[in-house]
Image (cartoon, rainbow, N blue to C red):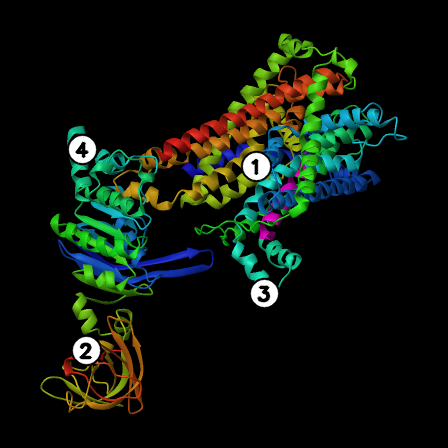
Amino acid sequence: MLEVNDLQLTYRLGSLSHHALKGVSLSVGRGEFFTLLGPSGCGKTTCLRSIAGLENPDTGRIAIQGATVFKDGASVPTEKRDIAMVFQSYAVWPHMTVAQNVAFPLEMARVGRAERDERVRKALAMVGLEPYADRSATMLSGGQQQRVALARALVKNAKLILLDEPLSNLDAKLRDQMRVELRELQQRIDTTAIYVTHDQDEAMSMSDRVALMRAGELIELGNPADLYLRPRHRFTAEFLGQATFLPARFERDEERGAVFSTTLGTVVTTQRRYGEASAHTLAVRPEHVHIGTADELPDGLDATIVSRLFSGRMLEYVVRIGETVLPAHATSRLLFSAGDRVKVSIAAENWIVLED
Amino acid sequence: MPTLALGAILAYLVVAPLAALIISSLRPTGFPLDDGWTLGNYAKAYGNVEFLSLLSNTVVFAVGATAVAVSTALLLAWVLERTDVPGRVLFRIMVLIPIAIPPLLLALGWALLGNPRNGLINQMLRPFIDGPLLNPYTMTGMILIQGLSLVPTAFLIIAPTLRNLDPSLEEAARTCGAGFLKTVTRTVLPMIAPALATAGIIILIACFVLFDIPGALGMPSRIYVLSTRVFYLMNNSPTGAPLYGEVSALAMLFLVMLLAMGWAYRRMTAQSRRFVTVTGKAFRPRMYRLGPWKWAVAGLLGLYVLVALLLPLGVLAWMSLLPYPTAPTMDSLSLLTLENHAGLFESDAFVGSVGNSLTVAVVAATLVTIIGGLVSWMVVRSRLPGRAVIDNLAFIPLAIPGVMIGVALIYVYLALGSAVPIYGTIWIIVAGYLTQYLPYGARLAGNVMLQVHNELEEAGRTSGGSPAKVMLRITLPIVLPALLGVWVWVASHSLRELSTALMLQGYDNSVVTTLLWDAWAGGDVTRSAAIGIWLIVGTSSLLLLWQLVSRLTTRTATN
């Protein structure tokens, strides 16, 4: 559906230059919800805008549905690409009504009047804005403007929809609601979506696959569960959630996975090590650090509760095991207090072996 | 391609006059197309004592008027935006109204009030005071009146900054134990310093190039500043023939000076754009309570309105209704007549000049808006190569006084001769205004473009619109109301412009302002007053129309 190969882009301003894309490659299948995730300035928006033809990369290749739209500087103009886009600022045109906004792509495609009206009505119905068709676009709330922008993108029936942080200007509650709606819509009309966000929750909850970017490079790509539970890179593990990192020395391979020695003693994992190096880093997420009484976890490590933060839904402990201090998240099933002696266990499959 | 076309237009409007000016300064005869090279013009222009006094006069006048304008505007802005003085809304309108009044008329009004021989105020005070109290025909008079005429401009730049200042910043200073004065000097002043500097330098540049007030008040008493000196050398030189070469040589120094200031201004505004002090946060500015002083302050405001608006306007209106100039007394009330006004509309000269003025204003405003819009779109929006050159070219005329644009165009169109036979017609005045108002047009339109989010245009492209379609269907409709503002600005300035029109005056291209100037110079006080009144009617109805239109367009936009 979408092929991006070795995209390079450098911004130049006088003697200053910024290497915004350093050889990004990705391949997105038909019907996929694909997210570009990363901190601001990582190149995710530049990459999306390159796919739209709003930025001109220096070299590389972009193909949409097998048709090359960009190759080493030669570019098909934005309006001739089979795409639709939703912008961060909504970019709803203030001098048009809601219906006129949505009808614009069809006008540009010279769709006949009757068909145009019907498709606009359908698109507005899809986002629940039918009653607002004749309103001036400026009279709508932020959430409604977002829907207008969405309807305008959907009406075109483009094979590829590009979304540039479309929810970042909405308040938290509306954002959660729109996540679900957006994902449902995308599946219902069976289109391919490329979604840009810096919010890892958004990326994880909506996407089929996520590409994590940093400083113009694609760091890691995979489905949300794999990226969260089995990241290869420290950056991925950190960006997608909290994690404790422990330096580890490779001991031996066993049937289930590699065994390492760490400050917590010998750790059995269910992964293989990367390459031949002896020094590795292991990671563990706080919710996988299991706290219990000596009765519950007789084989656990001896630990002391250092501090406790109660936030209702969850308890955030910090525990010390020997010289190692690590956070542990637990439910309110059992309450421990600072200074309590407890047992801690971490399951073999919850240990993450990192490549870097 | 578009770059080249636009570049060619700008070259014609900016580079050609500038080159003519430079070459002329190096020709023995002062004509760009004549033979020979010389530095003699420079020796003549700079090598005498008069030059030093001209330079010091110009600097004293410009700096003085700027200081008057900025300090008055700062006080007014602070009182009107940040204190509980009564009548704020009314006073704010009264402070801004003079924008519609040509500065020449302010000068004439005060000349009629303060003329040492028969000025109305001096006449009325004669029984009580020995000798005339006021004399506007002095450097001090020129500085004060020029300063007054620029107060609204400075006010418009400074007031929004004071209004948008987050009061929590001041409150923070108060909680740190700073008193009122400390708060003002340590927090408020530094925060509005960029706006003050911007206002100061814009007005300083204007003061170096303005002609009207030094022309009306300084020339009769032989106090010359740069612009009036150039006018004098071109029109009333001792030898009788225009001293083209010397004028051009004189122009060079000021060109360099003004370009340096213009460059400083650009650097400053480029930096200030980085500090956005206007946040989306809603707050109410902190109001200082004046307590018992508020009536005294309101009285001072009233005095300001009297001096800057009511008195000079009143005396013009009064004089326009009289058969001959006389002071307003019970007896003279019986003399009142509409003769002067009726006479104007029966005179071919006046009706013709009104037609000329309107034609010039409409054509110049339309062309400046179009060219300025294109320039700003290219500079702000496009990524076309050569846009920096275009940007700079469009900025240069800001530093060229109207009289010099007049001089330069005389060279250009005398040289072009029958190829572009517009010398002596109203079209040469249009050409002059195009050059003169292009920087403002481009800047104002640029501000408009900056407010239109990039993504609005990009959404048009991703919706399948070609660049031309997006321009036509999206960019243009969105910026049109604001471009109308640019149009009104240029039109009203073209209506009231005097110096360029005066320099380019021929047989049948007189406009209202030159007609007024000639009537005044010919000593016909009542007729000039009547013309002045109609000029004000013209400029203010234009502004009124714009207010109406912009209110209508914002209403339809929000409906």
On whether residue B209 falls in the magenta region, the answer is yes
Question: Does mark 3 fall on the same chain as mark 1?
Answer: yes
SS class of the residue under badge 2? Answer: loop
Q: Residue furthest top?
A: B346
Three-letter amino acid code of the residue under disc 3: Cys
Q: Does residue B491 show up?
A: yes
User: Which residues fall within the magenta stretch?
Assistant: B192-211
Three-letter amino acid code of the residue under disc 2: Arg
* Nearer to the camera, B51 or B199: B199
Please identify the quarter of the rendering in which residue A299 is found.
Answer: bottom left
SS class of the residue under badge 1? Answer: helix
Give the side of residue B27 with respect to residue A222, left or right.
Answer: right
The image position of residue B251, as x and y in percent, is: 69, 37
| Pointer 3 residue | B176
Q: CA distance from mark 1 to mark 2?
A: 65 Å
User: Is the C-beta separation of discs 3 and 4 under 8 Å?
Assistant: no
SS class of the residue under badge 4? Answer: helix
Please identify the quarter of the rendering in which residue A153 is found.
Answer: top left
Q: Which mark is residue A333?
A: 2
On whether residue A181 falls in the magenta region, the answer is no
**First-in-chain label (1 vs 3):** 1
The image position of residue A5, as x and y in percent, is: 23, 59
Q: CA distance from mark 4 to mark 1?
A: 50 Å
User: Is the C-beta separation of discs 1 and 3 under 8 Å?
Assistant: no
Q: Which mark is residue A116?
A: 4
Q: Residue at x 26, y 53 (%)?
A: A174
Q: Local crowd at mark 2 within 10 Å, few (<14), some, or many (≥20)?
A: few
Q: Does residue B23 show up?
A: no
Image quadrant where one finds the N terminus of chain B: top left
Q: CA distance from mark 1 to mark 3?
A: 33 Å
